[in-house]
Every structure is written in structure tokens, then in C-alpha cells.
Image (tube, rainbow, N blue to C red):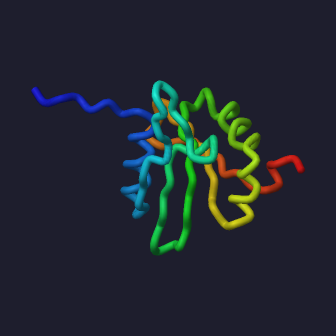
Amino acid sequence: MGARVKWTPTTRTIGFLEARGWIVDIAERQQGPITRDLFGCIDLVAVHPDKRAVLFVQVTSRSNIASRIAKTLAQPTTRKLIQAGVLIEVWGWGDEAEPRIERLNTWDIQA
């Protein structure tokens, strides 16, 4: 028997994006026992050469989408990243084959 692959929300997101032509890398890093997200809220960075797009993704379970949106919107850099043209999305995975995707916009952020 072969080893069983553990499909986490992160690995599912990477596979989903790569299958659609995105180049993806993990943006969070370990600092001792603590995991630090890029800009305090980003798990993955993806680039699509044909679309000339940069996508930052916060990955979670479907049940935690609202809290991850709040976490991302609370970061002081989020508005500036969106204004710079970076796409920021929160992806929530459940038992379904595709994630629920919420794209953030500057109007989501309170001034």
C-alpha cells in the first residue's frame, strides 16, 4: 500500500490553483513554535503569467471564512496591497470539490 496523502486546505488550494495555470508558493513561515503569515494574513502567493495577476490567499475551512476575512481586513497593509493591484482572497474548504472564495476589495475596509 502506498502512503496516504493528507489533503489540507493549503495543499488543496495549491493543487486547485496550479491546475488552472497559477504558479504558487507558501508564504507563511515558522518562527519557533509560531507560524507567521505574510503581512499577518497571507498563506499563499500565486502568480498567473497569462493573466498578469498576483493573488494572495488566506486558506481556511468553510466554517472559519468569516473570521479569516476579519483577520485579513484588520491588517494595516491589506488596503495598500489591494490598491497596488494585488488580488486578495479567502478560500474556505469543506467536503465539496471546490472552495468557497471571497475576494476582498478596498470598500470592504473601513477607513
Q: Residue at x 71, y 51 (%)?
A: 78
Image position of 35 with respect to 21: above or below: above
Residue at the extreme right of the image, as rendered: 111
**Depth check: 86 or 40 in front?**
40
Residue 29 vs 89, above or below: the answer is above
Where is residue 51? Give x, y as percent. Answer: 52, 72
- Residue at 74% in and 64% down: 83
Q: Position of residue 23 (x, y in %)?
A: 41, 61
Name which quarter of the figure residue 17 lies in.
Answer: bottom left
State the image coordinates of residue 35 (x, y, percent, origin top left).
51, 32
- Quarter holding the N terminus is top left
Q: Is residue 30 left or right of residue 54?
A: left
Q: Please state the horizontal and vertical placement of residue 81, each as a whole percent of the image.
A: 69, 59
What residue do we see at 55% from left, 68% from top? 53
Q: How many marks?
A: 0
Residue 74: quadrant of the picture: top right
Name the residue at the left extreme: 1
Seen in the image, is 12 located left or right of residue 92?
Answer: left
Nearer to the camera, 77 or 16: 77
Q: Relative to 35, is 111 on the left or the right? A: right
Q: Residue at x 69, y 33 (%)?
A: 66
